[in-house]
Amino acid sequence: MVLGPLIRDLRDALGYSQGRLADLLCGSAGRATVSREDVSRWENGKRTPGPFWLRHLAAVLEVPLEVLEDAKLERRRFLTNVAATAVAPVVASDLIRSGFSAALANDGLPVDSWQEKIVAYGRDYMSLGAAEIQARLAHDLLILQQQLEEPGMWVIASKLMTLYGKTFPGSDGAKAANWYRIAASAADRSGDDQARVWVRGRAAIALGYEGASLGMAEMFAEQAMRISDESSLGRLNAIMGSAHVAAIRGDKQPALDLVDQGRRVFDKVGSQEQTSDYAVPWWRMNVFISLLAARLGEERLAAEAQERARANLPATLPRFATHLEMHRGLMLVRSGDKSGGVAHAQTALEKLPPEKHSLTLRLLMQEIKGNAGH
């Protein structure tokens, strides 16, 4: 794991500027001082914090892993984070009222009903897009927070919070990453290793695929693989997330080696379910490989993955067909046709109804333009 980018990503996820982080570190360390310039040097790899500052960074940034494992997810913090996502005050008011009404009525849904909601949300996210389900999901999370009295409910909360992070509006993935951190804490609270691996693996592939918060993507992947070495969808996501981080950093052979490792895990645990965000069927595995190959400039591998994905992609999921066309745009840019690649990707994005756009597609468009020098 690269320390500098991780410090930056954790700082961004908490909403701190470099100066604010320096102030917090000084407050934590007593008489010792550190400046904004020191933080910048750490993040840029020009200097490495020694053991003293590493301890205080862990405290201020809420890492490393043992801190996450021992963390206590306070309901008030949960409420604050959910309510803060509502843009309009009247929306926040409605959400808060719903949460307290549920607590006063004490008529919470049983675990089986929440499991059914997870299935429904997984499918809705794939077909409807983030904007259409975000408010509904926030409403249910506020109700769910009143029922976190048993491990099974923490598993449900962790999975819904992970999905909520994927719907969070933003431009760099930092706020989504903060939600993944909270989801990981909720999974830890459940004591269910399968959930702990899945949440971290899903966060790793989400951030790695988006090319956002690479340090945190790498952290989540490493945590997932340390928790359990059993083949699972969580481990598969963690491996593919690591592969994308390596590809973006230009580490070609490690990225391809991870793809091979991911394929072996997929052969054991690949999903039969085709239309859920909680599943990894054959077509989706190839979507992961398609973008990774485009990032590496591996035209043949990208084309093969795109062909396999299209052959199996359900017609009800046009957003993912857009992903594949945008991967093609990135591939064109990487092969030297910069204007043609950007135009191809932009045309594909414009064909998709705006309400079905996602943070992931916006970040992908930024990446394509960045590679083209726009």
Image: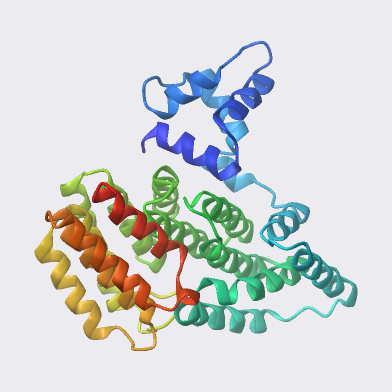
Residue sitting at 36 percent across and 52 percent down?
211
The answer to whether residue 269 is visible is no
In-image side of 353 versus 154 (left or right): left
Residue occupying the far left of the picture: 300
In-image side of 114 versus 267 (left or right): right
User: In the image, is residue 327 above or below residue 2?
Assistant: below
Q: Position of residue 177 (x, y in %)?
A: 52, 52
In-image side of 339 versus 163 (left or right): left
The answer to whether residue 117 is visible is yes
Q: Quadrant of the N terminus?
A: top left
**Quadrant of the image occupied by residue 192:** bottom right
Residue occupying the far bottom of the picture: 315
User: In the image, is residue 127 above or below residue 167?
Assistant: below
Residue sitting at 84 percent across and 69 percent down?
97
Picture mark count: 0
Q: Position of residue 254 (x, y in %)?
A: 20, 48
In-image side of 101 versus 328 (left or right): right
Give the camera-side residue of 20 and 49: 20
How is colour applied across the structure in the image? rainbow
Give the camera-side residue of 111 and 348: 348
Residue occupying the far top of the picture: 31
Residue sitting at 31 percent across and 66 percent down?
346
Residue sitting at 85 percent across and 68 percent down?
100
Q: Position of residue 169 (x, y in %)?
A: 55, 60
Q: Position of residue 242 (x, y in %)?
A: 32, 52
User: In the image, is residue 196 above or below residue 160?
Assistant: above
